[in-house]
Image (spheres, grey):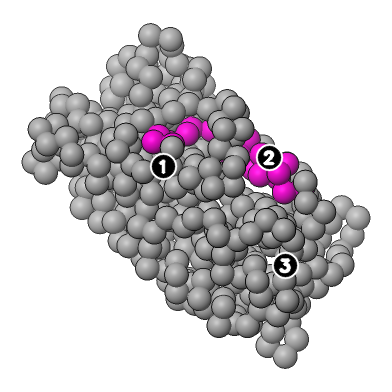
Amino acid sequence: METTCCIVGGGPAGMMLGFLLARAGIETVVLEKHADFLRDFRGDTIHPSTLQAMDDLGLLDEFLTLPHQEARQLSGKIGDETIVLGDFSHLPGRAKFIALMPQWNFLNFLAGKAKLYRSFRLMMNAEATGLIEEDGVVRGVAVKTPDGPLTIRSELTIGADGRHSIVRAKAGLIPKDIGAPMDVLWFRVPRDAADSSETFGRVDNGQILVLLQRGDYWQCAYLIAKGGFGELRAQDVSVLRGRIAELAPFLADRVAEIKTWDDVRLLVVSVDRLPLWHKPGLLCIGDSAHAMSPIGGVGVNVAIQDAIAAANILWAALRKGEVPEALLAAVQKRREPAVKLTQAVQVLVQNKIVSNVLRERGKVRAPWIIRLFNYIPWLRRLPARFVGLGFRMERVRSPQA
């Protein structure tokens, strides 16, 4: 098979870039190794930066008809004090909230819009196994499909296949490991109609719990020290139930829904970044180029900003069928500063706040600078801007053919 651009990975970055390139009239193939997008406990927060992109594309109103919840502020109970940590109401743009939506709905929506263009092809059950290189230039990928092996030749190959990227590995691009002091346990607990409608966090007694309001259930993230899951899992799951009930007493009558450890998923947190995102004929974006911490839930949205920037910079060259490496470098040059700043903030929060909380026992009191948020409300705009828009929000500039 031959195409102009072959994108490996049907996650948010890959699907957004595939859609934008097909919309610009560029022949594009997206490879997704799974049979569908139905995988739980993925990034389900669609931030204002991504919602702005949907508005740029004229799709926001239709997109928001999909089932979702809206978080217009972020709050947390630290020790005995409840603090509003972020207020999205002052952000520019139409969507002044985070949309909480299953990622498979988001991906299916993008795929459906992309398929309206004849230049787009989505291949499910198609797993990239290697790169085709000729004279130091990547010319496509080798693919495993249910019908047998397939070779796809392309002018440009995009690695958008996540933090365990086969494309990155086969290209010999080695990320710099920045590190993280914690891992995250993901699980669900039923939500009652009388519960709060807000998404919020709870910090106390050496523990951190984040509750994402998802309609009839809470999507829960419980932070643990890096590598500590084995020790915790060696105990009965009732230990975890007790900790959740201690942090959020209103859930005490529902934590029994966590029946076994099989109801709990482990997210091994890694933070890394490629020094070089590209080589001739190849570009990595999203988690393939930079794995983000879950701090702020910004990873999906940073990846989508990469895709928008890549489409803005590369569409004209792809139409001509020639993509010089200087243009691939231009994508990294545009996106790398925002990625570095985002990771720097995440690492600061991880190392100065999260790791200290997880080491402590007993009552916790919020730092004075955090307590100021309750007395100087405009301070809430700063984290809201970081979480909602990031350090560089990309606008869709690639055309519709």
Seen in the picture, residue 106 relative to 284 is either above or below; the reply is: above
Left/right of residue 317 with respect to residue 276 in the rendered view: right
Residue beneath disc 2: 108
Left/right of residue 392 with respect to residue 383 in the rendered view: right
Q: Check contact, mark 3 vs mark 2: CB within 8 A.
A: no
Taking depth in this image into account, of 219 and 25 the one nearest to the observer is 25
Q: Residue 203: image x %, image y %?
A: 24, 33
The part of the image, by quadrant, that contains residue 86 is: top left
Taking the image as drawn, is residue 267 in sight?
no
Q: Which badge, 1 or 3, is on the more N-terminal residue?
A: 3
Q: Looking at the image, which residue is at 29% across and 38% down?
A: 90
Mark 1 belongs to which amino acid?
Gly
Taking the image as drawn, is residue 158 in sight?
yes
Instruction: Verify whether residue 112 appears in magenta.
Output: yes
Residue beneath disc 3: 5
Q: Residue 235: image x %, image y %?
A: 41, 32
Q: Which residues are magenta?
A: 95-115
Taking depth in this image into account, of 70 and 143 the one nearest to the observer is 70
Q: Residue 161: image x %, image y %?
A: 62, 59
Q: CA distance from mark 1 to mark 2?
A: 24 Å
Q: CA distance from mark 1 to mark 3?
A: 32 Å
Question: Split into 4 quadrants, where in the image is the C terminus?
Answer: bottom right
- Label 2 neighbourhood size at 10 Å, few (<14), some (14-19), many (20+)? some
- Label 3 neighbourhood size at 10 Å, few (<14), some (14-19), many (20+)? many
Taking depth in this image into account, of 231 and 305 the one nearest to the observer is 305
Numbered mark located on residue 93 in the image: 1
- Label 1 neighbourhood size at 10 Å, few (<14), some (14-19), many (20+)? few
Q: Looking at the image, which residue is at 24% across and 36% down?
A: 85
Seen in the picture, residue 162 relative to 129 is either above or below; the reply is: above
Q: Secondary structure at mark 3?
A: strand
